[in-house]
């Protein structure tokens, strides 16, 4: 837990030159960056789908765990995604601000970190 918080602080204090901006648009209010994307040796994509108001995560390797941390409050959220290769994360799970997502994979020591910046709140239909 302390290691994950240390990684989170390091990512926010020292912007990485290796972060690849995956999906950026002022219209939908969300920016996704995968840290060290060139070091991922398998197919892994994250994309915001405006129509569904969800972040779509697709991986060639099955995902073992997914955790997100709100950078402002250090609030952790875990998702039960064991064995999944396709995940949809609702934009409403991410309040305004910066977040870090940590993906771990089955039968692999690889860890993928992604920065998610939300600049516009999700509109909830009543």
Image (cartoon, helix red, strand yellow):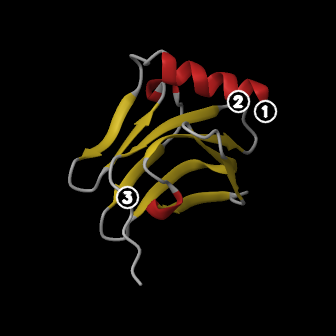
Please tell me in which quadrant of the rendered image residue 6 appears: top right
Label 3 sits on a secondary structure element that is loop
Marks 2 and 1: CB-CB under 8 Å? Answer: yes
Q: Position of residue 2 (x, y in %)?
A: 77, 26
Q: Residue at x 52, y 60 (%)?
A: 89
Picture disc at residue 109: none
Q: Is residue 66 left or right of residue 35?
A: right
Q: Position of residue 123 (x, y in %)?
A: 36, 69
Q: CA distance from mark 2 to mark 1?
A: 5 Å
Q: Is residue 40 left or right of residue 26?
A: right
Q: CA distance from mark 1 to mark 3?
A: 28 Å
Q: Of the residues under marks 1 and 3, which one precedes in the sequence?
A: 1
Residue located beneath label 1 in the image: 1
Q: Of the residues under marks 2 and 3, which one precedes in the sequence?
A: 2
Q: Quadrant of the C terminus?
A: bottom left
Marks 2 and 3: CB-CB under 8 Å? Answer: no
Residue located beneath label 2 in the image: 4
- Say above or below: 65 vs 3: below
């Amino acid at each position: 837990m302390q290691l994950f918080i240390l990684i989170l602080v390091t990512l926010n204090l020292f912007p990485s030159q290796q972060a690849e901006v995956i999906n950026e648009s002022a219209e939908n209010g969300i920016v996704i960056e995968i840290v060290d994307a060139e070091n991922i040796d398998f197919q892994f994509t994250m994309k915001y789908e405006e129509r569904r108001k969800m972040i779509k995560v697709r991986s060639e390797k099955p995902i073992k765990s997914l955790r997100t941390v709100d950078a402002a409050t250090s609030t952790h959220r875990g998702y039960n995604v064991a064995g999944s290769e396709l995940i949809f994360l609702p934009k409403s799970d991410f309040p305004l601000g910066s977040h870090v997502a940590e993906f771990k994979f089955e039968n692999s020591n690889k860890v993928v970190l992604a920065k998610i910046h939300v600049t516009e709140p999700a509109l909830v239909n009543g």
